[in-house]
Image (cartoon, rainbow, N blue to C red):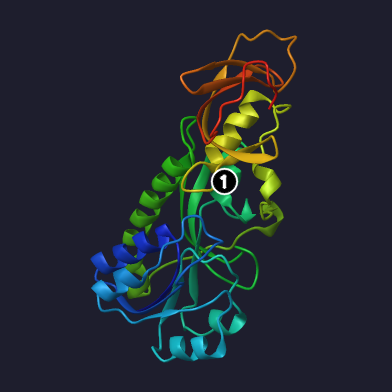
Amino acid sequence: MKILFIGTVKFSNKALQKLIDLNAQVVGVCTKENSKFNSDFEDLKPLCKKNSIPFRYIGKNILKEDYDWIKSFNPDIIFCFGWSSLLKNDILKLAPMGVLGYHPSKLPKNRGRHPLIWALALGLKKSASTFFFMDQGVDSGEILSQKDFEILRTDNAQTLYNKVTNIALLQIKEFLPKLEQGNYRTFKQNDEDSNIWRKRVKTDGQIDFRMTSEAIYNLVRALTKPYMGAHIKYNGEEIIVWNVEIIHNVQDNLENGKILDINDNKIIVKTYDSAVKIIQHEFKTLPSIGDYL
């Protein structure tokens, strides 16, 4: 089974390495030389060169010459793992078996953008790792493999990214021989159960201390590394916040955003319902106790 691989993030690199380890027949790879769009961007060129796999850099859209290059390998199937642009119908129809995509949510729920970030920011307790055959819709094709996972309160963007990656690699090991032997099954999604998460914008990452402590905690852990970090607006600057913890039993007649204490570079700030301690941040000059954020 000849596989053409498309991807450009850290997960793509892990998945491609897994296919190589499983002796899959990867005939070519499409990736990107750089990407400002993906915080977890990774160029697949080094892995391709190490394993003598032909590769091609492509842009946001697959052009005619890119299509011709892919077609020249006569792939039986295309794997598209970690690609933030929709594929056009000519690519979706190019390989006889279709295009296998990946989405870390419990499809048909939570289609769309930034699934791990939204799951953490919204405080979800469960989700799933899903491989599906892509169609012209948004994450709407027939599902090949789906594994549930729990989102722990202690999870953040990095731990959840690692957890989902490990689950997905086990799924690849499980379904690859079934694809090769042609004895796999898929099941359709129920569109009536679906929703589509929108693209995040910069203001979605801004901490507003009128929010509850829980909401702030969820936002910060959703956007910590490998992503761009939540931020505070202070004195006309954007200050990145990487880690906070909730502080309880706080005097309730104090205004939101008031700095209650600063100790060992950690800043305690009043929120709507209690307070948060900003543990890791990028303040160059610390504010003062009594100031407002």
Compared with residue 224, is residue 38 higher up or lower down, i.e. above or below?
A: below
Residue type of the residue flagged with mark 1: Ile
Which residue lies at the image location 54% right of the left edge and 76% below the top edge?
59
Residue 38 in the image, given as x and y percentages of width and height: 52, 59
Which residue lies at the image location 62% right of the left edge and 20% below the top edge?
288
Query: Looking at the image, which is closer to me, 161 or 232?
Result: 232
Few, some or many residues within 10 Å of mark 1 (<14, 14–19, 20+): many
Compared with residue 46, is residue 164 higher up or lower down, i.e. above or below?
A: above
Q: Tell me if 221 is positioned left or right of 138 in this view.
A: left
State the quadrant of the C terminus.
top right
Residue 185 in the image, given as x and y percentages of width and height: 45, 66
Please indicate, yes or no, whether residue 124 appears anywhere in the rendered image.
no
Query: Looking at the image, which is closer to me, 154 or 19?
Result: 154
Query: Looking at the image, which is closer to me, 225 or 92?
Result: 225
Q: Tell me if 215 is positioned left or right of 97 in this view.
A: right
Which residue lies at the image location 67% right of the left edge and 55% below the top edge?
199
Give the residue pinned by disc 1.
117
State the quadrant of the N terminus.
bottom left
Residue 110 in the image, given as x and y percentages of width and height: 62, 51
Q: Secondary structure at mark 1?
A: helix
Residue 211 in the image, given as x and y percentages of width and height: 71, 28
